[in-house]
Image (cartoon, rainbow, N blue to C red):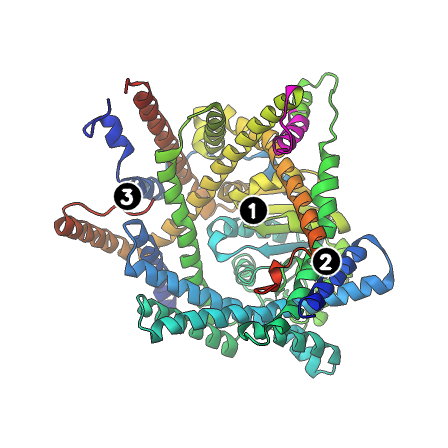
């Protein structure tokens, strides 16, 4: 019962959305559209679960005087400030935009950009032409990097052309095969959900 | 035989922080002392430019922000460039975000290009920032079915009172959708391109370009390839900015990594060929 | 409006946080961890505000104005918070099932067309075009590349003969794809570094650069004296 009802809900709603896509029946289309709009609100409210979980973990760390308690305290203070300021002033307020532009943007992009440094280090240490396949990968990577940077064109006008050809032709073939495989995988996962075999999304005990 | 003093061993075990420092210098130095290398225009950028040029004046164009703050250094210069183009062609711009960071960049773009956002006299008539729509792809489907399902825009104004939104009944009324994304464009093709026939342009990070290719040019009529694409577009709209300024640094960094790869492989081949 | 002083403070704040995050490159340290935690708190708080605004504008306000149907999703969503209850955890499954059901249905219905049938259609290219050898070769590479790459992932039976040849061709096409992907990914990450360094060059954030260099030099000398050899950072 505690498992069958949620599984039943999933099955009905999956079939309703699929029917909405393939059939033009006003009752089905209206029901699907209204449900979709309702789900958007439910998804937004679900964000609260993440906030509560995060707060619990870090409060326990502080109360238990575990390592990195200071960092946890800073995290909770920042969280509280962003929620309070946003709730009181509104997300469109210039002060909130200022906080976003000067705190979130630099930190988010700095952390993402760290990968660039590690990729350079990895390219130096690990990028070896150990086999013909690795050589093909390496050659393609080098041509694309030279083609996409202006310096490649300065060395030889053919680099941008070759780089674009790699993206247009072999890459298209490879990625198309991958996304078709993903689509088939998605289809089989959905069939498993419809048969009630896929229950991981229902949490522990499912 | 490779010993600890052997040059190949020293090369292979170099401190990674030396590599980080070299990369930082290769990026930082050209920004202070640019070489001024010319930046050619690639075919996908030309396709994007021509498509926007070819739209009748006053066409409704949707800028769909699906980008996080992390990819702002790549995607925001693209946004500034194509928003300038849309303004120059008097197209109507509807900005909507499917990522929570989107509305901030949408607001910034309006301020940079039009001088003001919600306080501009043309706000609501020629452009609008609808803000964030939660729900991921479900949000895209809902928006495609009825763009007026959003009650209030990013600044709290009632969407039903905005003149620009009046003629819209579904995504079929969009003449173009520009997807600004750091994660995927497949969902936009699924919810806007295929069911409603909306032409899509991808203003995407370089990472995403390989995944855009299966849809180009049938569904995605053009795309901007990361910061390089932004630099190209800045040239086309005659609005040189930070993207163009960053191209020399891009060149230097790419050259450095290629040298790293070559040196690393030379050392590997030399060590491999030595008798053990 | 944000005054000039606040703008300058913002530039310093932005530059300082960038350098705090970049200190991780020297080695993992408390400063970089603080930067990570600030980001975690800020991004989560910001996401919560935007989500809350969406719920307020699109559900709570219409409900207050008399549209009683909005009570159903609003009340149903509250069941999500039984996630934290061991006894009544099963109640959390009801709205979760609804969200997953709708989301999965939306994606899979459209995916069958966009990522399967339309891609098959796009792969059905002319095998031979008179007087256009370049387009012909490109079409053949795409067609056999797609087929070969798909066959490459068929592991149920050993591949022999022409199928094996096709799978090998597909393998090389995939290697070229991954190489292109690496090149593009590296380009993207460098672009982010460029963006951050450009922001560090803006005055007064540029004052932080020599300060950071001095701190790194001091840390380096300190490490060498303490251990005889600096610890190598991850990477």
What is the x, y in percent for residue B262?
37, 27
Same subunit, labels 1 and 2: the answer reads yes
Magenta segment boundaries in residue numbering: C141-161
Query: Which badge, 1 or 2, is on the more N-terminal residue?
Result: 2
Q: Which residue is mark 2?
A: B144
Query: Which badge, 1 or 3, is on the more N-terminal residue?
Result: 3
Q: Is residue C156 magenta?
A: yes
Distance (Cα) linking label 1 and label 2: 21 Å
Label 1: state its secondary structure.
strand
Q: Which residue is mark 3?
A: B17
Please, is residue A105 above or below residue B273 in the view? below
Please, is residue A14 above or below residue A126 in the view? below
Taking the view exactly as shown, the residue that stands out farthest to the right is A25
Give the chain letter at badge 1: B
Q: Quadrant of residue C72?
A: bottom right
Label 3: state its secondary structure.
helix
Distance (Cα) linking label 1 and label 3: 30 Å
Discs 1/3, front = 3
What is the x, y in percent for residue A16?
78, 60
Majority secondary structure of the magenta segment?
A: helix
Label 2: state its secondary structure.
helix
Q: Pick whichever, A192 or A15, lies toward us.
A: A192
Distance (Cα) linking label 3 and label 2: 49 Å
Q: Quadrant of residue C39?
A: bottom left
Residue depicted at 48% across the width and 28% down the height:
A143
């Amino acid at each position: 019962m505690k498992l069958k009802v949620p599984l039943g809900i999933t099955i009905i709603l999956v079939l309703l959305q699929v029917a909405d896509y393939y059939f033009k029946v006003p009752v089905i289309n209206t029901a699907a559209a209204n449900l979709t709009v309702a789900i958007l609100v439910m998804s937004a409210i679900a964000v609260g679960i993440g906030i509560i979980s995060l707060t619990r973990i870090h409060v326990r760390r502080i109360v238990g005087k575990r390592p990195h308690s200071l960092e946890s305290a800073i995290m909770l203070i920042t969280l509280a400030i962003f929620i309070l300021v946003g709730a009181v002033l509104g997300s469109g307020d210039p002060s909130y935009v200022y906080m976003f532009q000067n705190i979130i943007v630099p930190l988010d992009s700095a952390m993402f950009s760290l990968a660039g440094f590690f990729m350079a280090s990895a390219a130096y240490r690990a990028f070896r032409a150990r086999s013909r396949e690795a050589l093909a990968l390496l050659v393609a990577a080098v041509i694309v990097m030279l083609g996409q940077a202006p310096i490649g064109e300065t060395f030889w006008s053919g680099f941008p052309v070759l780089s674009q050809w790699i993206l247009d032709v072999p890459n298209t073939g490879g990625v198309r095969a991958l996304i078709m495989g993903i689509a088939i995988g998605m289809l089989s996962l959905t069939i498993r959900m419809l048969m009630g075999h896929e229950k991981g999304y229902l949490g522990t005990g499912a | 035989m490779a010993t600890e003093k052997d040059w190949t061993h020293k090369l292979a075990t170099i401190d990674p922080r030396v590599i980080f420092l070299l990369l930082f210098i290769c990026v930082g130095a050209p920004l202070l002392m640019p070489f001024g290398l010319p930046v050619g225009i690639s075919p996908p950028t030309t396709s994007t430019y021509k498509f926007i040029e070819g739209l009748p004046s006053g066409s409704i164009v949707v800028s769909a922000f699906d980008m996080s703050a992390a990819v702002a250094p790549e995607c925001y210069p693209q946004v500034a460039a194509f928003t300038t183009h849309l303004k120059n062609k008097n197209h109507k711009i509807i900005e909507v975000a499917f990522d929570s960071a989107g509305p901030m960049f949408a607001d910034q773009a309006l301020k940079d290009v039009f001088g003001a956002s919600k306080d501009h006299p043309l706000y609501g008539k020629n452009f609008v920032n609808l803000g964030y729509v939660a729900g991921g792809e479900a949000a895209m489907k809902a928006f495609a079915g009825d763009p007026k399902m959003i009650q209030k825009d990013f600044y709290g104004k009632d969407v039903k009172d905005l003149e620009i939104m009046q003629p819209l009944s579904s995504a079929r009324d969009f003449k173009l959708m520009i997807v600004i994304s750091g994660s995927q464009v497949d969902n936009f093709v699924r919810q806007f391109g295929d069911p409603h026939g909306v032409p899509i342009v991808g203003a995407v990070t370089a990472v995403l370009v390989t995944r855009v290719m299966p849809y180009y040019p049938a569904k995605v009529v053009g795309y901007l390839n990361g910061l390089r694409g932004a630099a190209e577009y800045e040239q086309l709209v005659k609005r040189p900015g930070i993207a163009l300024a960053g191209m020399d640094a891009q060149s230097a960094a790419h050259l450095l990594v290629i040298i790293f790869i070559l040196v690393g492989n030379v050392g590997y081949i030399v060590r491999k060929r030595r008798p053990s | 409006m944000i005054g000039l002083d606040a703008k300058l403070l913002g530039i310093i704040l932005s530059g300082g946080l960038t350098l705090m995050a970049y200190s991780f490159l020297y080695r993992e340290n408390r400063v970089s961890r603080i930067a990570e935690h600030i980001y975690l708190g800020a991004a989560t708080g910001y996401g919560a505000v935007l989500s809350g605004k969406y719920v307020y504008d699109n559900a709570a306000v219409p409900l207050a104005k008399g549209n009683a149907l909005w009570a159903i999703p609003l009340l149903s969503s509250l069941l999500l918070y039984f996630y934290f209850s061991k006894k009544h955890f099963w109640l959390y499954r009801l709205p979760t099932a609804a969200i997953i059901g709708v989301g999965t249905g939306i994606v899979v219905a459209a995916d069958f067309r966009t990522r399967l049938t339309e891609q098959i259609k796009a792969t059905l290219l002319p095998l031979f075009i008179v007087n256009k050898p370049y387009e012909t070769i490109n079409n053949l590479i795409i067609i056999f590349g797609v087929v070969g790459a798909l066959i490459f992932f068929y592991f149920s039976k050993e591949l022999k003969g022409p199928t094996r040849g096709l799978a090998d061709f597909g393998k090389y096409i995939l290697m070229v794809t991954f190489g292109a992907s690496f090149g593009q990914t590296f380009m993207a990450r460098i672009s982010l570094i460029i963006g951050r360094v450009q922001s560090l060059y803006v005055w007064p954030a540029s004052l932080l650069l020599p300060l950071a260099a001095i701190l790194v030099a001091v840390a380096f000398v300190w490490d060498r004296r303490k251990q005889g050899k600096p610890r190598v950072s991850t990477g």
